[in-house]
């Protein structure tokens, strides 16, 4: 797997942050961008009781939401200025209960493409000094060009 990429747009970092800031879903769950590199994006989220399922773990839908955004923005970081990004498919593995003080979703591009890119993501739970992998994802992202209503 290629580990280093060159962004097509020199302003990729600000572009990712600007697009992320428009996501009401990320605001709702308290998620923030931690790091943006060409082909790699990290998103953090604090634990919140409002996001748990019946056993007190972060709900699997929230886990998927975090990983989807991390994988999508990793792909978006490599896209040209005139492209937007949409997820067209993903598969998630919930490996352990999502329990911790805070969480980090890390998305990495596995294979970039002009129209279709594949990203991989991992969600880590942090409790004090302890870090554990709680979920992984593989997603397929589409570059969208000149489509009404999709500008970022």
Image (spheres, rainbow, N blue to C red):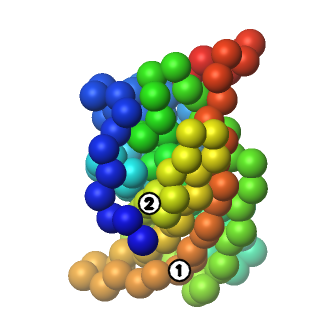
Q: Which mark is residue 47?
A: none
Q: Residues within 10 Å of mark 1 (few under 14, many from 20)?
A: some
Total marks drawn?
2
Q: Is residue 13 left or right of residue 49?
A: left
Can residue 23 be seen in the rendering of this structure?
yes
Can residue 52 be seen in the rendering of this structure?
no
Callout in the foreground (2, 1): 2
Q: Secondary structure at mark 2?
A: strand
Q: Which residue is most to the left?
A: 129
Q: Is residue 40 left or right of residue 111?
A: left
Residue 103 percent coordinates (x, y):
43, 66
Residue at image location 46% in from the left, 81% down from the top = 133
Q: Are marks 2 and 1 in contact (CB under 8 Å)?
A: no
User: Which quadrant holds the C terminus?
Assistant: top right
Give the camera-side residue of 56 and 29.
29
Give the camera-side residue of 8 and 125.
8
Residue 120 percent coordinates (x, y):
53, 66
Residue at image location 72% in from the left, 18% down from the top = 147
Separation of disc 2 and disc 1 at Cα?
17 Å
Q: Which mark is residue 134?
A: 1
User: Which quadrant holds the N terminus?
Assistant: bottom left
> Of the residues under marks 2 and 1, which one precedes in the sequence?
2
| Quadrant housing residue 132 | bottom left
Q: Which residue is mark 2?
A: 108
Vertical position of residue 96 compared to residue 45: above or below: below
Q: Secondary structure at mark 1?
A: strand
Q: Residues within 10 Å of mark 2 (few under 14, many from 20)?
A: many
């Amino acid at each position: 797997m290629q580990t280093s990429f060159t962004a097509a747009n020199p302003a990729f970092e600000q572009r990712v942050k600007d697009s992320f800031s428009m996501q009401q879903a990320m605001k709702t769950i308290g998620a923030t961008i931690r790091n943006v590199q060409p082909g790699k994006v990290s998103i953090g989220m604090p634990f919140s009781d409002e996001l748990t399922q019946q056993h007190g773990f972060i709900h699997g839908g929230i886990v998927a939401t975090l990983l989807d955004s991390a994988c999508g923005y990793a792909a978006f970081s490599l896209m040209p200025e005139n492209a937007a990004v949409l997820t067209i498919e993903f598969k998630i593995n919930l490996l352990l209960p999502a329990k911790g003080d805070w969480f980090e979703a890390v998305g990495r591009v596995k294979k970039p493409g002009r129209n279709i890119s594949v990203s991989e993501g991992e969600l880590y739970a942090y409790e004090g000094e302890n870090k554990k992998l709680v979920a992984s994802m593989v997603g397929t992202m589409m570059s969208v060009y000149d489509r009404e209503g999709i500008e970022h």
